[in-house]
Image (spheres, coloured by chain):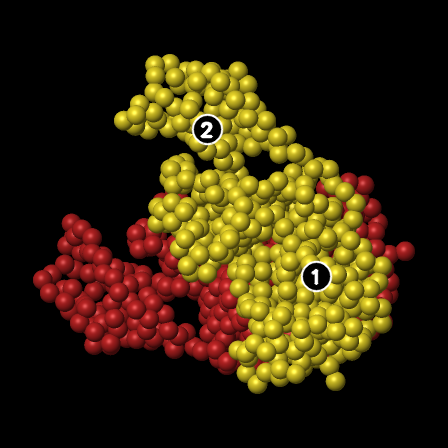
Chain colours: A yellow, B red
Amino acid sequence: MSKIKIGLIGLGVVGTEVYNTLKNFPDVEITGIAVKDTSKKRNIENFDYSILTDKPQDIIDNKENNVIVELMGGVHPALELLTSAIEKGKHVVTANKELLAKHGEELFALSEKNNTVILYEAAIAGGIPIIMPIKTILASNKITKIEAILNGTTNYILTNMDVNKSSYDVVLKQAQNLGYAEANPTNDVEGLDSAYKLTTLATIAFNHRVKFQNVYHEGITKIKSEDIKYANELGYKIKLVAYATNDSGKIDIRVHPMFVSKKETLAHIDYVTNAVTLEGFPIGKITLSGPGAGGLATASSVVGDILSIEREYGTTDYILPMMRCNHTHDGNSEIIPISETENKYYLRLHTIDRIGGIADITKTFASKRINIETILMKEIQSDNTSDIVIVTEKCKEKLISEIEHELLQSGCIKELSSKIRIS
Amino acid sequence: MSKIKIGLIGLGVVGTEVYNTLKNFPDVEITGIAVKDTSKKRNIENFDYSILTDKPQDIIDNKENNVIVELMGGVHPALELLTSAIEKGKHVVTANKELLAKHGEELFALSEKNNTVILYEAAIAGGIPIIMPIKTILASNKITKIEAILNGTTNYILTNMDVNKSSYDVVLKQAQNLGYAEANPTNDVEGLDSAYKLTTLATIAFNHRVKFQNVYHEGITKIKSEDIKYANELGYKIKLVAYATNDSGKIDIRVHPMFVSKKETLAHIDYVTNAVTLEGFPIGKITLSGPGAGGLATASSVVGDILSIEREYGTTDYILPMMRCNHTHDGNSEIIPISETENKYYLRLHTIDRIGGIADITKTFASKRINIETILMKEIQSDNTSDIVIVTEKCKEKLISEIEHELLQSGCIKELSSKIRIS
């Protein structure tokens, strides 16, 4: 008889691979699967259609099940279903990054009250082992910084723009044709997906609850081929970075495009691969990389979590050790607003060529006490305009906004074509 | 009162950082520390010298201690001490890669008999979380391949030879002056240290006991600046790779220099950083990188292991879940001898320039049915010799030895200056 009886919600790409992988583990049994369409043909060998239902609540109400595996995604009805499951004392394994980012605080509180666990390795960086290591083997560390690539779609687009010197629009279309980007790509390209994952990752890594609405996010839609060209010239790659630092409880957390030095491992994480760099004490700096999505890789993490529950199950007080692993999910962290963060900046200024132009621009920077590290000016265009690229030393974000305003007001520049933070 | 009482053996660089880190965890107490010299001044704040002893057996005999942390290194007397500890029912945390490689089989058998655990995250790749993830969150996977950089000293030397275009001897001396290489560097530069670590890593990853004496190893002492130059030209970096594959129980396992494509993450792991790439099903390919040595990083893993024991301690049958994590440590795997392995090769042939020379050489390759992928010939030297570089397609190692023999016999080449396998 199986120790663990699972009610599975969702039998899409990930669910199917979870089902297939669990066949190798006789101590774990799937008793029922909730799907939208019970009559749909499933591409699984010798599949027993009688365990399908289109009523997920039935799966949860089934007293036999002690673990609910949620792979449906989205907030509703996942939130209501998992709330009900936890209230019935069932453990939860989920890959639902949006749900955890938006309702993690209440779900983890409920789970603690009911002496159950919620495991979610698959929700952050797919197959990469990151949540379990932070909770166990890295537990002696105070983690102070996260720099991560948590979205395969945008990394695929940025890599292709770089390798093939193509524009964003062209590459997005290719990615959509290949199935790497959705018809409506907003969630990925605007940085929302990364921000969901970063919310939970930072909460665990810093042991401070981060609220999703406090995570600044900015996507890749405004990145131009010229920016990628200049990045290469200056020794960088442009990546959509999920970035967070914790300085004694003051948290700087955000998702946006970043110049990453080619000397960093993160700069070499290409196409759909994800990576997480952590800095902490005593460990120093580690980078974990691998497939951030896909049915097989995600199934590795989902089943890894299921087997962790199975391993602990049946020892008296079996849930205690795992509870001890639960980091802080409630309370509030102090978040530094984006305008108060400090960064180096890559700025591409669109200017009209005139005598004294550069002098006026650099004077404006000096007036704000911002040091310029690099300045590049290429050929003047036929319309008498030219792009000037400036790399600043570290300064406050709000000073850059002030400079932009002044340069526009004084007519020194036609526009600030690009502003990309440097890691 | 502390749940866990530790007897610590060794208070060097790692031991000191373990001691410091454990101060943050009141549930773990160090009751005694065995050192060589009890009178030596220790650089630890408010250190209580009364817990020092120069008799490690006393630490083990102390009935209070339930965990022994061994950081002395080497086989003797570590083997005898840990054997005694396990027989007394104590759990062991160790960073001793040589001991585990040479006596892991007997130690793990003894530990299983005594219902104790041996944890050793720090013994393989220092701070990088790899053993615990394989045993827990990756447990659903069948791991089929390992490619790793497990030795910081050799990676530091190879990186410097590349970056500074220096010779092996010059860089080794620098590394010794900086403390990155020992006065007698044999253990590192001949690949022994990597082979120790790979023995245990492959045993766990493949769930097949690998015997250290079956792990082929070859160091970096014969790598020439020319080879590094050609590697770059051909799109590779030279790394000392710990390599192992498992094809249904037939294991190919070895440590030697390798050409690693610049497209691979491993090629960009520089200086003293270590990295482990695993391939498995369903996960695909992941790479974990970070500091492979040093007091702080190693302490992160040692304390991570200690906290894992502490977490499980006190639940009834508390040791069962961890025992279930113990992979196969006995039995024997079938090892493919190096001569039977298949590789692509980079060959640098030192030849005397003559008409028909290249024709004769390439004919010899064709006679063994080995396809040449690339051939490079640079300027002829004043002594009428020249280097010819050949990159082969995949073929058996023993064929390359046969070709070397034939080319020497026929006078086609003066010597095979370099033979480096390609990843």
Q: Quadrant of the C terminus of chain B?
A: bottom left
Q: Quadrant of residue B402?
A: bottom left
Of residues B286 and B76, the one drawn nearer to the viewer in this rendering = B286
Outermost residue to the left: B355
Residue at 78 percent of width and 53 percent of height: A106
Task: Answer left or right for B68 relative to B410.
Answer: right
Outermost residue to the top: A356
Residue at 28 percent of width and 63 percent of height: B391
How far from the left and from the top, in percent, is residue B228?
35, 52
Specify the subunit that label 2 lies on.
Answer: A
Q: Residues within 10 Å of mark 1 (few under 14, many from 20)?
A: few
Question: What kind of residue is marked 1?
Answer: Pro
How far from the left and from the top, in percent, is residue A114?
84, 62
- Under circle 2, the secondary element is strand
Residue at 16 percent of width and 60 percent of height: B352
Residue bearing the label numbered 1:
A77
Residue bearing the label numbered 2:
A416
How far from the left and from the top, in percent, is residue B207?
59, 75
Q: CA distance from mark 2 to mark 1?
A: 44 Å
Residue A63's place in the image compared with B266, above or below, is below
How far from the left and from the top, in percent, is residue A316?
85, 72
